[in-house]
Amino acid sequence: MADETTATEPARTPEARGENAPPCVDATAVSRATRLELLRLCLLQRAIEDRTMNLYRQGRISGSYYTGRGQEAVGAAAGLALGPDDVVAPLNRELACHLARGVEVAHVFRIFLGRETGPTRGRDGNMHFGVPECGIFPLVSMLGDLCPVTVGAALAFKRRNEARVALTFWGDGGMCTGDVHEGLNLAGVLHVPAVFVIQNNHYAYSTPTEREMVNTDIASRITGGWSIPCERVDGTDALATYACVSAAVERARADEGPQAVEAVSLRIHGHAAHDDARYVPAELRADYEARDPILRLTERLRLDGVDEDTLQDLTEGVTNAVAEGLAEAESAPDPDPATLEDGVYAMPVQGAERT
Amino acid sequence: MSTVTYLDAIRVALADAMRDDERVFMLGEDIGHFGGPFGVTKGLSDEFGTDRVIDTPISEEGFVGAALGAAWMGERPIVELQFADFISTCFDPIVTVAAKTHWRSGIRFPVVIRAPFGGGVRGGPFHASCPEGWFVGTAGLKVVAAGTVEDAYGLLRSAVEDDDPVIYFEHKGLYRRLKGEQPAATTRTPIGRAAIAQSGTDATVVTYGAGVDLALRASGTLNDSIEIVNLRTLWPLDEPAILKSIEKTSRVLVLQEAARSIGAAGHVLSLVARHAFEVLDAPPALHAPVDTPVPFAPELEDAYLPSVDSTAAALRDLLEY
């Protein structure tokens, strides 16, 4: 089985080690500890997603499966940019944002596996979950819906004079929805501490951005159209993205009104597990694969003087966390069909029997 | 006690709810200094300020979604739609976000959506609809409709204090026509409980909203003893109350202002077919408009809507079967 050994053994070429990837910018305000934590979060998202994609292909995950490969840095950066009392409504490319907020690896696997003790008790799967105790609102698949919800959370903070921020994500596809327009407009009129991170990953499912909108300059449209400051950042650069989102979060916290960031990347995988993304031109994919956010951040850390043992320890820690988290989730109980109607209402109507 | 209109009772309920709980605030179009298209919120922004009676852009999807986000953070928002017809523009946050989130995450949404519904005001297809049927049967939502001055107040107070999303249908035709004593500030109409608006033994009318007053007036033209069940909560239905009345009278007419194939009637009739079959002396009857949008011209709208005469005729048919 020599072929199998070759396939699972990490290649040792400079390319595979990321040594030809352009390093992240040296954003001096970002501490070494934060840089290492960003790398850990990106590695953890990728390792969880790689493992889960294998589980899906083995038939051990129901439904479908969505990854954020190539976009890990954006969720990680936004998750770390928020304070502990802030809240966030992630979409399905932002697993690292959940992890940054303290969601445990086992909890992530419990939702994918549909377990009773997972975040939705088996009522929903995929990335369709929130963790209220971590300040995370559950994803809603109807794109754009989370924008007004986030504006409302920020409105609550403003009403109570709390120095808290609400953040959400959508993509170039979600940018075309009516909810996003209404939410952005409302955020501006109400002057609330909301931050919007637009993941411009070039494709809405299979449709390229230039077929979704005539003016593809999302940052200038948000700045000029809704009067919400919006900076464009390279979403494959974890440090630049962290610095950009952190500044936006702190401006919102300082009562400067809603803020936005357009983070540009490429969704390396298809929309979901069934989609091989053959509609992405080879040159575009090659360009972004060479600018893999994990390789870029790793290269930055090497230039910072972080030694290979430290990087290796980080990778091994992530590998172990994924193995342990999956084992713990697999031992969790399946949901009990007898509980199916539990929780439809917070205050069930007593005595009105359903027949 | 002073005499108030149905509309006054709603306004007083809003004011009392905001006075009792600072988490309660309002979002809607032209609800501030203007007082809303029907004057329901007149004067409220003077007492509570524009931070609690918030004028919004024309963005139902935006401000219903925002109400849910604020509720997530522990506030108790009340949203006003100018006309219930416009609820189609915020269908998505209601049926996907409001209805499904608690079940899958445990997050509570104590949000009230006020929806002025109903015809008789020559509003036509976009300003006189009864769209409650789009929500009756949707798990996670509670749907209520006030048919009396007391319920206008009591249902609204209960809705604001409820931890689930409640759509509160208030009937435009009753706003200034229906009068009664100002309900006490302690009045609460329990959600999920129907009421007997009139006790009787010969036949049951199951109805809600403007149908309650209509049924009372129609039964007054007959010599028979008619029981009127005022649903008050359209979803979840108070099934035991409906069945109990039919067990007593053995005849049932479902009366609604929504077109015959939507509204709450189908759910009531389904319940009757499954659980009251053996006690019935006549086929269950339905009196409701034909399946068209609400027409504008007086001749057409008058023909479309159930009237005292047409309701009395439907009851006579039922009693004579």
Image (tube, rainbow, N blue to C red):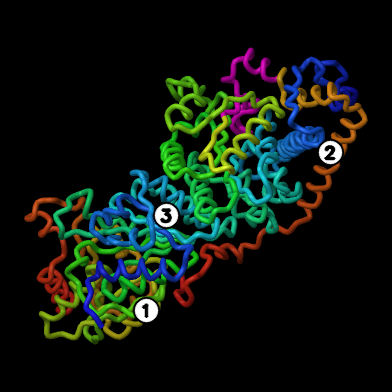
Between disc 3 and disc 1, the foreground one is 3
Q: CA distance from mark 2 to mark 3?
A: 51 Å
Residue furthest out toward the left: B299
Look at label 1 and name its amino acid: Thr
Instruction: Give x and y (percent) for residue A262.
Output: 57, 28
The residue sitting at 29% across, 58% down in the picture is B262
Q: Is residue A76 left or right of residue A92?
A: right
Look at label 2 and name its amino acid: Thr
* Looking at the image, residue A313 lies above or below residue B203: above
Magenta stretch holds residue B88? no
Disc 2: which chain? A
Disc 3: which chain? B
Q: Which residue is mark 1?
A: B187
Q: CA distance from mark 1 to mark 2?
A: 60 Å
Residue furthest out toward the top: A283
- What number is the disc on residue A319? 2
Q: Is residue A313 visible?
A: yes
- What number is the disc on residue B241? none
Q: Which residue is mark 3?
A: B51
* Looking at the image, residue A129 lies above or below residue B177: above
Segment tinted magenta in the rendering: A262-289
Q: Quadrant of residue B84?
A: bottom left
Q: Quadrant of residue A74?
A: top right
- Mark 3 residue element: loop
Tell me if label 2 and label 3 are in contact, CB under 8 Å.
Answer: no
- Circles 3 and 1 on the same subunit: yes
Q: Nearer the viewer, residue A210 or B295?
A: A210
Q: Quadrant of residue A291?
A: top right
The quadrant of the rendering that contains the C terminus of chain A is bottom left
Instruction: Give x and y (percent) for residue A267.
Output: 62, 27
Q: Is residue B293 left or right of residue A44?
A: left
Q: Is residue A143 left or right of residue B121?
A: right
